[in-house]
Each structure stands twice: as structure tokens, then as C-alpha cells.
Amino acid sequence: MPCRLLFFLKCWGIVGVTPALRITPMNSLIVKYLITALMVVVISELAKRSDRLGALVASLPLVTVLTLVWLYIEQQPAAKIANHAWYTFWYVLPTLPMFLFFPMMMQRFGFWLSLLASCVLTFICFVGLAAVLKRFGVELW
């Protein structure tokens, strides 16, 4: 187990500092799941209390930042971490129309149909953006 992960977990009080402590890859994976799940729960609970605050926190790139941290802790090459941030930027763009389309659709067609249509719209926007960006040398797939 990389020492960065052990240091991170110790600093945040997630694990003790006993020398007998062994962090296995499975334990590391469980910690990632728990932290990520906690983020989803906190954001959904915030959204129940305040639409605006929940949306603000949900719009923050928390998952991306957490992923960058995990990649760094796991001692991935700097180029891999940088590429993750680079591609995340391009993958976020085609999702933006969904956030305008979904509320309008939901009023007329209900939640599930609107969600499905929004996912289809996002896919179409992604394919379109990928085709445009390919002309400028950016390969998304």
C-alpha cells in the first residue's frame, strides 16, 4: 500500500498510528467507497433542506477533486492525473444542456421519462462535441 494513503488516512484520523496496522488494497477500496458514499448522502440531505445549497454543493467538482486526490495518493504518474482533469473538462460540457432541459421536461412528462430523455440528450451532445473537437485535434474517444 502506498505510504501516501497511509499518511492521508492518519492525518484525517481514519486509521490509528499503530505499527501493526496493515492497510490492504481491499481496505483502501472500502475507504474510497465510504468517503464517496458519504459525499452523496451529504449532498442529497442538503438538497432536501435547501434547493440552492444542495445544487451549489452538487455542482462543485467534488468527485473529480476526490478522484485526483486518490490518483495522487496511489502514486499515479503526473501525466495521468493531468489527463484526468483535462478530459473531465471536456466531458462536463455536453452534460450542461441536461440541467436546462430536465426541469422543463419534468413538468410535462414526469421524472423517469424526463431523466431518460435528458440522458439521451447528453449522449447526443457528447457525440456532437466529440465530432467538433476531433477537428481541432482533441480526441474524446
Image (cartoon, grey):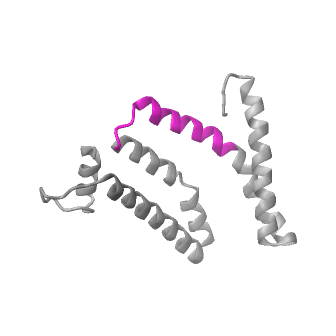
Q: Residue at x 23, y 61 (%)?
A: 15
Read off the magenta span.
Answer: 74-93
Furthest toward the left, the residue is 19
Quarter holding residue 28: bottom left
* 15 relative position to 35: left or right: left
Q: Is residue 129 above or below residue 124?
A: above
- Residue 101 percent across, percent down from the top left: 80, 58
Camera-side residue of 99 and 40: 40
- Residue 109 percent across, percent down from the top left: 86, 70
- Residue 122 percent across, percent down from the top left: 75, 50
- Residue 88 magenta-highlighted: yes
Q: Which residue is drawn at 66% across and 28% down?
A: 139
* 26 relative position to 47: left or right: left
Q: Residue at x 77, y 69 (%)?
A: 112
Q: Residue at x 60, y 63 (%)?
A: 55
* 127 relative position to 47: left or right: right
Furthest toward the bottom, the residue is 49
Q: Name the magenta segment's main secondary structure.
A: helix
Camera-side residue of 20 and 36: 20
Quarter holding residue 90: top right
